[in-house]
Amino acid sequence: MGFLLSSCVTARKVNYMQEPDRQIPSYADTLSFEDYQLRINDRLYVYVYSLDEKIQQMYNSGGGNSAQMRQQLGQGSTYGSYDLYTYLIDEEGNIDFPTIGKIYVRGMTTREVKHKLEDELGTLLKEIPGYSTISVEVNIVNRSFSIIGAQSGRYMINKEKMTIFEALAMAGDLGEFNSRKEIKLVREKEGVTTIKTFDVRSKDLVNSEYYYIEPNDIIYIRQIPGYSFGINHVTTVIGVTAATISFGVFIYSIVQTGINHVEKYKGGSNENSAQEGGAK
């Protein structure tokens, strides 16, 4: 019975947004979302808007619609090559932009890169007769995170700020037999890899550093011990218990019948021996 009850998956083990206590930790109010800072090997999609068609065609190598192109690149589709539409941040932290050359962008946000490109292009193009003000759009493409251990896979980050709950929902939630109290988050930043462990059941999680995920995060989810013999409903516990008791009674009756037969046989043998002794 103790083994069966310890194998039960209770609501306490799987429900989210629970009050912290001795078993479920609380988290300090450390939430402060920061814009993603660009890293080496990130790829940027840059689109230049201008009233001058020649300028727009010169800088937008893919042409076409910016929103459609950004969506395709964000979903991992590159029409055969990223190089045609995106700019790779090299080992020195630079991108190579047409007519400008090397621009250092490592550690900057996309908003900062946007302003920098607008300033650089504005200075370069204002000497052209009929110059009109330009605007630049900068986006990180192919941003993703990975989940291993349960619902393993690689998933795209399709919004600027994605929470851990949204990430788990994309993977189809955790299921009943996956641990929520020891989720590990592997994150690399500035060449340093850190591993953080947290309990996703705590309602205080929304105020913590674990709430938002970043591109290239790896989320590890382990199975609950006893998964191979999990019981997740009270009626199942009752059924298994009743079946176990019935089987035990059945075995006991067989054993007891055997013992009774042995004792009866021994008793008959002793009576026969006594009668034979009295005759003598």
Image: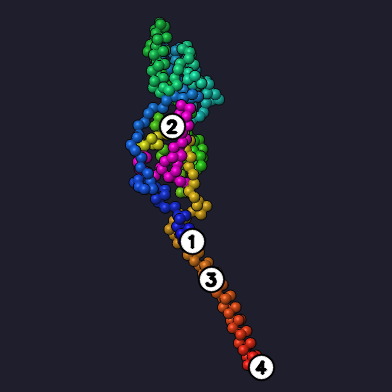
Image position of 275 with respect to 77: above or below: below
Image position of 20 with respect to 59: above or below: below
Q: Is residue 245 visible?
A: yes
Would you say residue 189 sits in the magenta stretch?
yes
Q: Residue furthest bottom?
A: 279
Figure quadrant of residue 37: top left
In this rendering, the label closer to the viewer, 4 or 3: 4
- Per the image, the residue denoted by label 3 is 252
Seen from the viewer's position, the closer of residues 238 and 158 is 238
For label 2, the SS is: loop
Between the C-alphas of marks 4 and 2, the distance is 101 Å
- Kind of residue at disc 4: Lys
- Kind of residue at disc 2: Glu
- Find out whether the residues at labels 2 and 3 contact each other: C-beta distance under 8 Å: no
- Per the image, the residue denoted by label 2 is 214
Between the C-alphas of marks 2 and 3, the distance is 61 Å
Give the residue at x 47% y 65%: 242
- Per the image, the residue denoted by label 1 is 240
- Find out whether the residues at labels 4 and 3 contact each other: C-beta distance under 8 Å: no
For label 4, the SS is: loop
- Kind of residue at disc 3: Tyr
Q: Earlier in the sequence, mark 4 or mark 2?
A: 2
Left or right: 112, with 62 as reference point: left
In this rendering, the label closer to the viewer, 3 or 1: 3
- Find out whether the residues at labels 4 and 1 contact each other: C-beta distance under 8 Å: no
